[in-house]
Image (tube, rainbow, N blue to C red):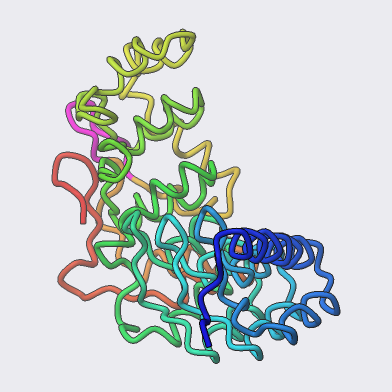
Amino acid sequence: MNLTRDSSSRSMYWKEMDEVVANLFHFTDCNHVFMVERILMSDIRLVNVRDDDLLTCLHIATGNGSLEMVELLLNYGSDPNACDLLGTTPLFHAAANGNIDIVRELINAGANIAHISDLQTDVISIAVAYGHFEVVKFLQTCHPDQSSLLTPQRRLTVLAACLTTNFDVIMFFTLFWRSDIDAIWFPFGRLNALGLAVFLNNVDLVELLLDLGASSSVPSLNYLNAVELCRNLGGREAVYKCLTKHDAVKAGQRLEQRILASPLRSALCQSPTPQKDKKKLLDSYTMTDLKRLFASSWGDSSSKSLVDSVSEPVSRMTLRFGDSGYL
């Protein structure tokens, strides 16, 4: 028996399959559990089918936050470690949404917590960048390396936080974990945080990054520094003025005002006066001091849980900012 189809029947077969796959993705996106199960019952192989962006139905279900759909797909054998075009797994989508029930379900199904995407970010980076600290704390308890919150991959948390304009996360990791504020994102033309802020045309974000010590002379997108990038993009007069006329002397005062209005509000209350000849804004705060300050100022238990979950070796407890470098 000849099992190969002729060209006309093959064309008809794939046309029918395209309709089935399109319906499967549509019903998944609409959270129509009954129809999705009906399609999978007719052909279980479709459970890991992908669209043009290499997304599976499980990616879509986790992105939509549908626990019932996630459970159904996993029961039919959907791969929890399937990677999309950017190398992110469904766990990344769940972490971005902050849905701890779906995060737990994926991990129980074998999702790899330590996976690094093609953008060199990990799941904890995503959860932190979107401010889902309960998810961060849960992921840490499951992570194979529980001892460190800030791995080299997680240094890009500041960049991810810039993308979501989460100023509190930017300040937390830059001031208190000395995350490299000039870290480069190689997959996107050497983009760094300040370059991203210029691209987003966000004056407040540019000013915050400069106050935190970001350098406008560091090459960023396509090897252009922030000022050059601003000129090339055009239409960014306010950003250009901020870059070229930044007043570093008042940086400490502006940071205090920002922190007093944020969940970090008492961390700078007793900070030393910034020296005019240096950008040293914090000195001699130990992690114990910071935990005490955060514990007294953070009413949000989910935010406080992030502080409670971190630790730092004694040899690196003293915070130094500015000319002495970053982690």
182 versus 283 height, above or below: above
- Name the image quarter holding the C terminus: bottom left
Residue 34 counted in the magenta span: no
Q: From the top left corner, tell me how far across and down residue 120 is, in percent.
A: 31, 58
Q: From the top left corner, tell me how far across and down residue 70 is, in percent.
A: 68, 79
Q: Nearer the viewer, residue 299 or 191?
A: 191
Give the quarter of the image for residue 192: top left
280 versus 15 height, above or below: above
Q: Say left or right for 230 vs 178.
A: right
Q: From the top left corner, tell me how far across and down residue 13 is, in percent.
A: 65, 66
Q: Nearer the viewer, residue 122 or 189?
A: 189
Residue at 43% over, 48% down: 170
Residue 276 counted in the magenta span: yes
Viewer can see residue 38 = yes
Residue at 50% over, 60% down: 54
95 versus 250 height, above or below: below
Q: In this picture, which residue range is highlighted in magenta?
A: 272-280
Give the quarter of the image for residue 37: bottom right
